[in-house]
Image (spheres, helix red, strand yellow):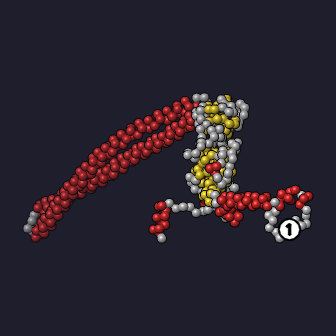
Amino acid sequence: MLNISTNKIEQHISGEKFSSLQSTLKKKSARSMLKVLYIFSVIMLVVLFLPWTQNIRSGGNVIALQPEQRPQTIHSVIAGRIETWFVQEGDFVKKGDTIAYISEVKDEYFDPQLLERTQDQIDFQQEGIVSYDKKIIALQSQLNALKKTSQLKQEQAKNKYKQALLKVSSDSIKYEAAEIKYKTAEDQYKRASSLYDQGLKSLTELENRNLAMQNAMAEVISAENQLLSTQNELINAEVELFSVRTNYDYEIHKVESEINSALYNKLDASAKVTKSENQYQNYQIRQQYYYVTAPQDCYITKVLQSGIGEILKEGSPLVSIMPANYDLAIEMYVRPMDLPLIEKGQKVRIQFDGWPAIVFSGWPNSSYGTYGGVVYAMDNFTSENGNYRVLVVPDPNDIPWPASLRVGSGAESMLLLKDVPIWYEMWRKINGFPPDYYKSLTESEKKAEYEKS
């Protein structure tokens, strides 16, 4: 066709029979074909140097950004029996609106005056605490009186003991004086007896000395008896002092023991009051759970328990709801090899299911029907599917996402990377290389690298 071969077909084939061959063999047609090929080659060469935006494509779903904005289930906190439904599927309810009413199924809560009776028990127990306080005050007064009486009795016994001790001292002196007198009388009698034997004293004088000695002996015996009696009184006084101290210590310890018992009983009654108050609060809070209310403004999506009179256990699901106010985000998954290419704030182009779009993979700005987003967060560990989860939120500087977009819708995302020539992108894909990992350094990072080197 280009007429560049040395083997010509003109001598073998008659061109008159084939009009197409005659048209092809014309030199004007050949030149036109060469020109077209040349222009096409130039265009292709220019196209190879056009910019191409590297990107990572991944599918995902629309979710609510905050945990409290996502679909959730309302459970029954207590066991009960469904009495009344106040909503149906699709209804919009405000925060605090009643969804259902539940009655009791446990016999310990059947009493309609449960709170009043529990409050009466608390009042009685508090009166018991007051009576223990009064008893403690009375025992404290008794203890103070015993301590005062014990002090006075011990002073009295000590005085009596001192008196007996002084009397013993006095009688001991008298006894010593009687012994000295007896010794003197005995010496006088012996001298008188010696003089009588010598004839110098009369018998009368000797008898008088003997009588005086006998009288002195009698005084010694009397003084000794008096001393022993006084010593016995001293011992009795000491025993009485010890007995007074022992008896009053016993009485004081007994009253202190009664005070400690009263304090223990008071503390035990206080613990019972606290327990009863806790029980009262539990009863009061439990009655609030008879009415299942909406935790926030939401829509009733599905009723999970049907009918009236159905018995529920603690934690049984009642209804599933969807919050009325929520911030949308895209939940997408990327391969571990693509994770180093992603950073917070990175631009993303999104195509939502149900919204028509014309997408040019390498020219996101030329695409139609796509919406802008930025990377909000990335997981630090892989999910069950082995990929990393990435959250994308709307780009505030781009077109707002569709107002009718709902949680659970599908989305196709393109995480935008660097702009490279088309020839470079083709060469990278032919060789199976990943997108460009290198990032341009900021001025501060360049300065830090320079100082480090």
Task: Kindly identify the residue that appears in the image at 57 percent across and 56 percent down.
Answer: 343
Task: Kindly identify the residue that appears in the image at 87 percent across and 65 percent down.
Answer: 10
Query: Measured from the top left, where is residue 344 in percent x and y?
Result: 56, 54
Image quadrant assignment for residue 213 = bottom left
Task: Kindly identify the residue that appears in the image at 89 percent across and 60 percent down.
Answer: 15
Seen in the image, is 236 located left or right of residue 199? right
Q: Which residue is mark 1?
A: 8
In the image shown, does 356 or 353 lie closer to the viewer? 356
Residue 388 shows in this picture:
no
370 over 210 or under it: above or below? above
Query: Measured from the top left, where is residue 437 in percent x and y?
Result: 60, 62
The quarter of the rendered structure image containing the N terminus is bottom right
Marks counted in the figure total: 1
SS of the residue under disc 1: loop
Disc 1 marks which amino acid? Lys
Residue 326 shows in this picture:
yes
In the image shown, does 240 or 420 lie closer to the viewer? 420
In the image shown, does 249 or 240 lie closer to the viewer? 249
Task: Kindly identify the residue that appears in the image at 38 percent across and 46 percent down.
Answer: 252
Seen in the image, is 202 located left or right of residue 172? left
